[in-house]
Amino acid sequence: MKEVFIIVLIGLIFMLESCGEKEKNIGDDVLVLDFRHDGNIDPNEILTTDYIKLETNDACLIDKVIVQVEYASDKIFILSGGADRNLLVFDISGNFINSIGNMGNGPGEYVMPVSFSIDTESNVVSVVDIAQRKIIEYGLGGFDFISEKELGYYSSCFEYINANQLLLKNSDSQSAYKDWEFLLTGGNLELEDKYVTREFVTGYSTGHTKNIYKSEGQVYAYAQYNPIIYRFQNDRIEPVYHIQFGKFNLPPKEYLEAISTNNANFLAELDVSDYIYYYCVFQTSNLLNVYYSVAQEAYIGLYNRNNDQIYSFPKTYFEEQMMVGYMDRPAGTINDFIVAALQPFDLKERLEDSYNFDPKLKTLIQNSEDDDNPILFLYKFKD
């Protein structure tokens, strides 16, 4: 557990508050969350868990990687990775319902889907195809193709502000908008405004592609190499959280420029450096989950929004204590749970080696095959 600090951004002056202080005037104040690892609290003491075994058949095969998970209209939406990316729909018990769209370059087809967004008010689910620079819309009810909209730049994700406004992440390193992190557009993608200067412009990225997300009806956004999580409201974007990583730091602009000379792919060098390689954020009504990687070791940071307590665990320690073997990085949320994938082929191999699994998970493993779809691992704070 860590202290929680509240700061007011007035120039470079910060005001320190005490542990346990609740958020107040969040539009003006920024909550500093330092995920500093300095102890080994058992995560079982603070978390409750669940599992969902996804159905496996020829129509819903997931090529190991789960890129994104969302829950809406009593359904689980999963964007799979690998060579055959697709958007799949399951019920809350893991039974397959349908797929949305398919690979290809025809109308309603995608080449490289990297994220999706759901607007329950308009009953639309939209896929971002970064290869074709398109947003492809499908009906949320029958999953039928509705329309596709051309982007004039590369974007990795967006979120609906309302039916007539979208906030997009700018992933372009060459367009006229390359110096801005976030772009506000109308419903037909006409540019309305730009937000947050990009300190380091690059076409390379890593980590979770969905870094604009919606939680409790509000839209949040964060960017690579920027420690601030922003909230969008009333056509303004305001800092809400300032993320810190204990003794680790995000890479400074000068370092990034030095290792990316002539537009070189710098990610491999950054991955083994002492700087943060990437971080991902997932938020529910009572939990902020920050997953970050440095020097090829991953960490899980948890902030309890109800009691202002902060926890941080090395991923390997977290996996061992939760008795889940190896878990992929989190990919989204279902209700108030954070969701990460567990791979059956890895689980079964560990089971044969007498790994001590959570009994609930062990039963699912015993009823799985090596090439089955992943098992979803869900965790949240205890009530």
Image (cartoon, rainbow, N blue to C red):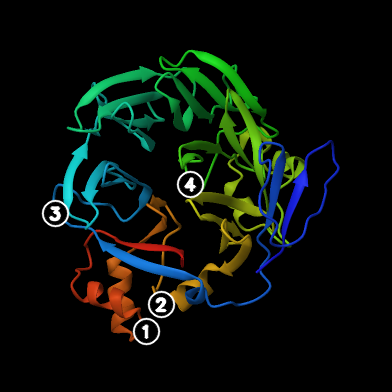
Mark 2 or 4: in front is 2
Under mark 2, the amino acid is Met
Q: Earlier in the sequence, mark 2 or mark 4?
A: 4
Visible residue check, residue 380: yes
Q: What is the residue that sits farthest to the bottom in this orientation?
A: 354
Please say if the residues under marks 1 and 4 sit with CB atoms less than 8 Å apart. Answer: no
Please say if the residues under marks 4 and 3 sit with CB atoms less than 8 Å apart. Answer: no
Please say if the residues under marks 1 and 2 sit with CB atoms less than 8 Å apart. Answer: yes
Please say if the residues under marks 3 and 2 sit with CB atoms less than 8 Å apart. Answer: no
Q: Residue 208 got which mark?
A: 4
Secondary structure at numbered mark 3: loop
Q: Residue at x 53, y 49 (%)?
A: 281
Under mark 4, the amino acid is His
**Could you say where residue 60 lies in the image, as x and y percent from the top left?**
19, 49
Disc 3: CA contacts within 10 A as few (<14), some (14-19) or many (>=20)? few
Distance in Å between CA atoms under marks 3 and 1: 29 Å
Q: Residue at x 42, y 52 (%)?
A: 331
Name which quarter of the figure residue 337 lies in. bottom left
Under mark 3, the amino acid is Asn
In the foreground, 378 or 362: 378
Q: Residue 323 got which mark?
A: 2
Distance in Å between CA atoms under marks 1 and 2: 6 Å
Name which quarter of the figure residue 99 lies in. top left
**Residue denoted by label 3:** 57
Distance in Å between CA atoms under marks 1 and 4: 30 Å
Q: Residue at x 27, y 62 (%)?
A: 52
Distance in Å between CA atoms under marks 4 and 3: 27 Å
Residue 257 to residue 96: above or below? above
In the foreground, 222 or 178: 222
Q: Earlier in the sequence, mark 3 or mark 2?
A: 3
Q: Residue 356 got which mark?
A: 1
Q: What is the residue that sits farthest to the left in this orientation?
A: 58
